[in-house]
Image (cartoon, rainbow, N blue to C red):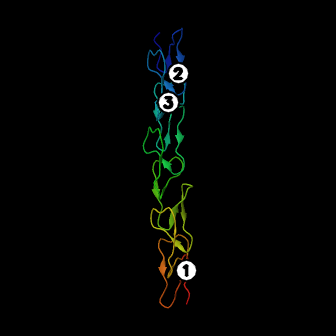
Amino acid sequence: MNCAPGTYSGADAGSCLPCAAGKFSGTGATSCTSCSVGKYSSDISSVACADCPEGSIASAISATACTECAVNTYAKGQGNSACTDCVSGKTAPTGAGGCGLCAAGKYAHGSGSCLLCDAGTYSAIGSDDCIQCAGGSISTSSGAGSCTQCAAGRFQTNQGETVCSS
């Protein structure tokens, strides 16, 4: 039996049957082929499988949908079967195609976002933690990319402070 694309004729079938979601077939198929990893088919009677879009994956054969990459992981390009972890100091939201650096004064948080450093601390670009200002220097507000030395005649002996004493 010469079945149309997206259908097949089984061994005992007297008619053409639709391929299930996650599978496809061409003209005259006697069985359906499973979508390979990184590809999916959400409809019955598919003639081809589609690549998962950037930021999502299909880790098993016969996928009927793609799964978005979790926070702080990514899948660059299309047709991926696994998400990749962001390196330290970089972050990504759910479904990302890449990781980004946090700006100076911010740090990479486990939530997939960059958070401001507290007053009395600072961070450089791409940091995954904030550093307390050393004695003799301060940061007066949150989000500092560096600490400021106390002016002449003023001092601060403690770390992580926001004001200089006279």
The crowding category of the residue bearing disc 2, from other C-alpha atoms within 10 Å (few below 14, some 14 to 19, many at least 20), is: many
Where residue 20 sits in the image (x, y, percent)?
Answer: 55, 23
Could you say whether the residue bearing mark 1 is in a helix, strand or loop?
loop
Name above or below for residue 5 compared with residue 14: below
Name above or below for residue 129 compared with residue 161: above
Name above or below for residue 3 compared with residue 94: above
User: Quick one: quadrant of the C terminus?
Assistant: bottom right
Q: Which residue is mark 2?
A: 19
Q: Which residue is mark 3?
A: 61
Name the disc covering residue 158, or none. 1
The crowding category of the residue bearing disc 1, from other C-alpha atoms within 10 Å (few below 14, some 14 to 19, many at least 20), is: some
Residue at 50%, 49% (x, y): give it.
73
Residue mark closest to the camera, 1 vs 3: 1
Please report whichever mark, 2 or 3, sits nearer to the chain's N-terminal start.
Answer: 2
**CA distance for labels 2 and 3:** 15 Å
- Determine the residue located farthest toward the left in the rendered image: 77
Residue at 54%, 11% (x, y): give it.
15
Q: Front-most of 47 and 148?
A: 148
Residue at 50%, 91% (x, y): give it.
153
**CA distance for labels 2 and 1:** 71 Å
Where residue 121 sits in the image (x, y, percent)?
Answer: 53, 72
Confirm or deny contact between disc 1 and disc 3 (CB under 8 A).
no
Q: Front-most of 158 and 70?
A: 158
> Label 3 is placed on what type of residue?
Ile
Confirm or deny contact between disc 2 and disc 3 (CB under 8 A).
no
Residue at 47%, 67% (x, y): give it.
104
Could you say whether the residue bearing mark 2 is in a helix, strand or loop?
loop
Where residue 65 sits in the image (x, y, percent)?
Answer: 54, 34
